[in-house]
Amino acid sequence: MAVARAPRRPAAAAGRRAVPLLVLALVGVVVLGRRGPIVASVSRTTVVEDGAIAAQLFQLAKASGNVAEFSVKLQKAGLMAAASGGAGDDSRDSGGGAGDDSRDSGGGGSRTKAGSSSSSSSSSSSSAAQGGGGKKGGSGVVLKKGTVPQLSRELAHGYARDGIIIVTWANFHFLDFTLNWVHHMEVHGITNYLVGAMDKETGQALADRGLNVFAMYDTGAADTGLGTADFGWGTEAFHKMGRQKVDLARTFTDFGLDLCLCDVDTVWINDPTEYFERYPQADILASSDDLDPQNDRGDDGLEKLEAIYSAMNIGLLFFRHSKNTTHFINAWQNRLDADDKAWDQNVFNWVAHEGLVPFQPHAENPRLVWGTNHSLVFGVLPVAQFASGHTFFVQRLFELQRVKPFVVHCTFQYGGSAGKRHRLREAMLWVDPPEYYSEDQFLSVDLKYPETPADYQEQDKVMMEGKRFKTAWKSNDMVDFHLKALGRELQQLKTAFKLAVALDRTIVMPKLLSWCDRYWGPLEFCQVPGAFRTRLPFVAPMDHIIEPANFGTGPNDGPENGPVIHYREYSFLMNERTPKSLKEGKLVVQPSSAVKQPELGKEGSQQVLTVPANLSDAQLREALAPYKDTQLLHFASLDGAFGQWEKQEDRDALQRRLSRMMGFHCCKQVKEGEDGGFAYLRLMEGD
């Protein structure tokens, strides 16, 4: 069965450059630029004087399968006046992805002139939004720019491709996640997507950008009744939101479409639609919360049959429309209607597992199994390739399994939406506006990392049926070492925070190594139970140790909680979006007890400023004042980098901020009734 993807390009390149000229001659349109008409089509010859426009035309033509498709692409790009008819390919480059007007920036800490956070603001706008006229769905439905249509069979089929539609949905709280989701769709040339807007603000914001949107609220209403704020796991709004997922599954499959339904906190790293095409016998393909792959290294097929026992995660589902699929969705809905507090994911699994035993594998593929009383066929997507927040960010199973990652879902993480946003930034899977990368004064530091004992975890040896990495340590002894080693890192990080506050600079967070995972309960040999392939130590997502929303940039935070600490993710200076001039123009600062005054010198081509060790905050500001316009100061060593605060209130204020920021370790194995947790703030006590 064919699936939605960018049009296949012919192997031969001959004749490609003639396509734009031929098509323009055929359709006889006027090409428009931002400064007005550039060229008009006359008979068979078309001259494009603007080189950038010519290049854009060539790329659009290469991605088009026929004249009608190319015509629509021109309209979407604002390069052609609207014409009647046309196919519904809506390919474009969004150019951004961090959400305008998001109400929970949570992290990043970009500054406006007033000093508040603008990390969620975006200059993102699709080329379609910049053009004039309207927009056409594939069925010929004319959508005026800025219009948020109600969902209909005609609309859905207009955006579908090869009978497949990809759908997510969100309210205004998750607008930036929505734009990031769309950005990655468009990076892969995926145009057969729709976003369900749960409120008017979201709908209008997406429609104004020319994105594929439909209203999930009635024409006369402001939203779906769930509001525009965060739902919060387990809340009444959360459970009601889950019911809308079931409604979407039923609606689109009833339209006669195959449906990929995914949460908005997923990111498509590579286009998985060809992967779905491998399994035409499957009625439902589902991601999984399993933390340990059933497959051998290098095996990129579906998880082996035993994986069906684990909890399937409904953050990414692929439905093939059929009567059997409809019966399943109805059974899912009926179970939810019977209990308004039931979690939609649990109910999905209950219905899927009914009558599962005895196993009945599919005759044509032993990794597909008949479920729901042997009425339809399920497959579990590989956990290394369709990853959870743990298998991707912590275990990095795609590396260990040597397979290609397709999708990551921000689960198994801490810090709410701010934690999710920051993890995606760390992985360079989040697109902020250009000023996030280019504007501000930054501070980076080098940490000294403790050595890991050779027998702490022997990753070339395994125990427990060949799964868990071998260790000679006892479980709680590993936790004790983790706390000791992490404490040495956090003491250095506290010095870095002092420097950032004293110099009023945005800190580029250093990588923090962690010798234990984080969980909601006791760990086994510093691993989450079931996450047997976790390699120790690992680069910890910041939310494992520090609360990303509590740096002071949130709307409900105030000066009484201490100074705002503006920050960037540890990968910031590795990101290709960060200007080369910023990276290469850094000034290395080296504290030394051998000098009495700052001395500027060079090490190779790198400028190095040696400053006296243990300067106070005021002395540091004075020593570095001549370099206030240097965008990046890098402290190659934190030994002697900061002496003391000259005012006690400044010291106390930073401590208040740290008391809000620092997370905790969970958990040691303890007797019932004892607390196995540990507050990381304790590791930063003292000056």
Image (cartoon, grey):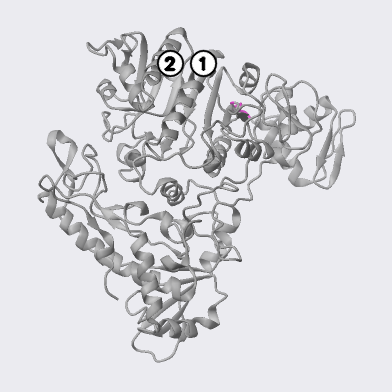
Q: Position of residue 583 (x, y in %)?
A: 51, 65
Tag of residue 329: 2
The residues bearing labels 1 and 2 have C-alpha atoms spaced at a distance of 10 Å
Where disc 1 sits, the SS reads helix
Q: Residue at x 82, y 26 (%)?
A: 27
384 is higher (above) or lower (below) than 513: above
Q: Is residue 346 above or below residue 427?
A: above
Q: Is residue 455 visible?
A: no
Q: Count neighbours of disc 2 (C-alpha within 10 A) and say few if under 14, some if 14 to 19, many if 20 or more.
A: some
Q: In the visual, does 165 lie left or right of 70?
A: left
* Label 1 close to label 2 by CB (< 8 Å): yes
Which numbered disc flags the more N-terminal residue, 1 or 2? 1
- The magenta span reads 8-12
Residue at left offset 62%, top offset 16%: 153
397 or 426: nearer the viewer:
426
Amino acid residing under circle 1: Thr
Residue at image point 49% right, 54% down? 575
Q: Residue 230: x and y, percent?
A: 47, 42
Q: Residue type at mark 2: give it.
A: Ile
Q: Main secondary structure of the magenta part?
A: loop
Image quarter in which the C terminus is found: bottom left
Q: Which residue is mark 1?
A: 253
Side of 336 relative to 682 (left or right): right
| The quarter of the displayed image where residue 147 is located | top right
